[in-house]
Image: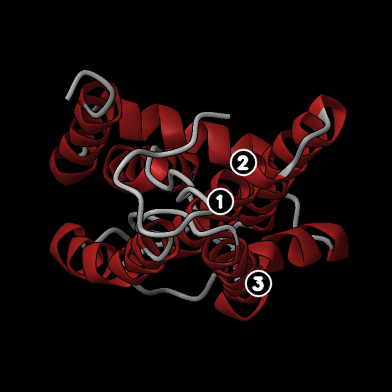
């Protein structure tokens, strides 16, 4: 619960400010005005949060992690991939009602509309790339490769976030709130499934896991 507390509290604070149009929203709008410069690069970066781009990456990681876990006889090998899929499925389940409830208008760079808070594209990127990274890390032996994977995940998430703000598709607070939401979902994944997967002894069916 200690891990879930900070992102939940920050998400609640941001949401409260958006709903009551508090001082953070004024700061957010001024920051957006300074940052928005629509161009081709920001458009391409924002696409990193598209379902068509991010979800297939996660799907590959789910398949690889499941295959490795099953092949190596890990206990409950199916739980981490299943939990990752559930975390991804929860993104629209949580984001859609929040968009409707907060009813936040978009930036001047997009046609007049409401329902921009929180950013679904950012939440998709955080959960898809984050869960894929968490699933693949245990399969990698090289510390350098592991670090590279974590860096790549950060680059993809930050790239999508920057593109969404720079292009004007979202206010900065929309993106920050989705970071918090994604952190909650990934933390939930870790608490539920991140430490499972003990290998079964080669003798088969043993009750004690092999320590490695």
Rendering quarter of residue 118: bottom left
Please state which of residues 157 and 37 is positioned toward the viewer in this rendering: 157
Task: Name the residue: 18% across, 34% down.
Answer: 12
Colour convention of the picture = secondary structure
Q: In 3D space, how far apart are the residues under numbered discs 3 and 1 (Cα atoms)?
A: 10 Å
Q: Which mark is residue 60?
A: 3
Residue 186 lies left or right of residue 207; in this view the side is right
Q: Position of residue 190 (x, y in %)?
A: 37, 40
Q: Residue furthest bottom?
A: 52
Write down the residue under mark 2. Answer: 138
Tell which circle, 3 or 1, labels the residue nearer the N-terminal end: 3
Does dot 1 land on a helix, a strand or a loop?
A: helix
Q: Judge depth for marks 2 and 3 and give the one in front.
A: 2
Q: Quadrant of the C terminus?
A: top right
Q: Position of residue 101 (x, y in %)?
A: 13, 62
Instruction: Categorize mark 2 by other alpha carbons within 10 Å: few (<14), some (14-19), many (20+).
Output: few
Please state which of residues 23 and 161 is positioned toward the viewer in this rendering: 161
**As displayed, is residue 13 above or below residue 123?**
above
Task: Name the residue: 51% across, 33% down.
Answer: 30
Residue 97 lies left or right of residue 188; in this view the side is left
Tell which circle, 2 or 3, labels the residue nearer the N-terminal end: 3
Please state which of residues 75 and 157 is positioned toward the viewer in this rendering: 75
Residue 201 lies left or right of residue 185; in this view the side is right
Write down the residue under mark 1. Answer: 135
**Residue 51 in view of the camera:** yes
Does dot 3 land on a helix, a strand or a loop?
A: helix
Q: Position of residue 166 (x, y in %)?
A: 69, 49
Q: Position of residue 173 (x, y in %)?
A: 41, 40
């Amino acid at each position: 619960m200690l891990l879930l507390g900070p992102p939940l509290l920050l998400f609640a604070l941001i949401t409260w400010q958006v709903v009551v149009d508090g001082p953070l929203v004024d700061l957010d709008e001024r920051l957006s005005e300074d940052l928005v410069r629509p161009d081709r690069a920001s458009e391409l970066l924002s696409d990193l949060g598209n379902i068509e781009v991010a979800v297939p990456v996660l799907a590959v990681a789910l398949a690889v992690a499941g295959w490795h876990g099953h092949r190596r006889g890990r206990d409950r090998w199916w739980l981490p991939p299943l939990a990752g899929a559930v975390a991804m499925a929860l993104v629209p389940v949580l984001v859609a009602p929040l968009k409707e409830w907060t009813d936040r208008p978009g930036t001047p760079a997009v046609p007049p509309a409401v329902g921009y808070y929180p950013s679904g594209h950012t939440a998709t990127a955080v959960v898809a790339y984050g869960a894929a990274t968490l699933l693949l890390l245990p399969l990698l032996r090289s510390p350098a490769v592991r670090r590279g994977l974590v860096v790549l995940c950060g680059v993809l998430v930050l790239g999508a976030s920057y593109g969404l703000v720079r292009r004007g598709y979202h206010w900065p607070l929309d993106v920050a709130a989705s970071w918090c939401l994604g952190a909650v979902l990934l933390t939930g994944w870790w608490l539920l499934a991140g430490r499972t997967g003990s290998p079964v002894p080669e003798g088969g069916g043993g009750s004690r896991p092999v320590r490695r």
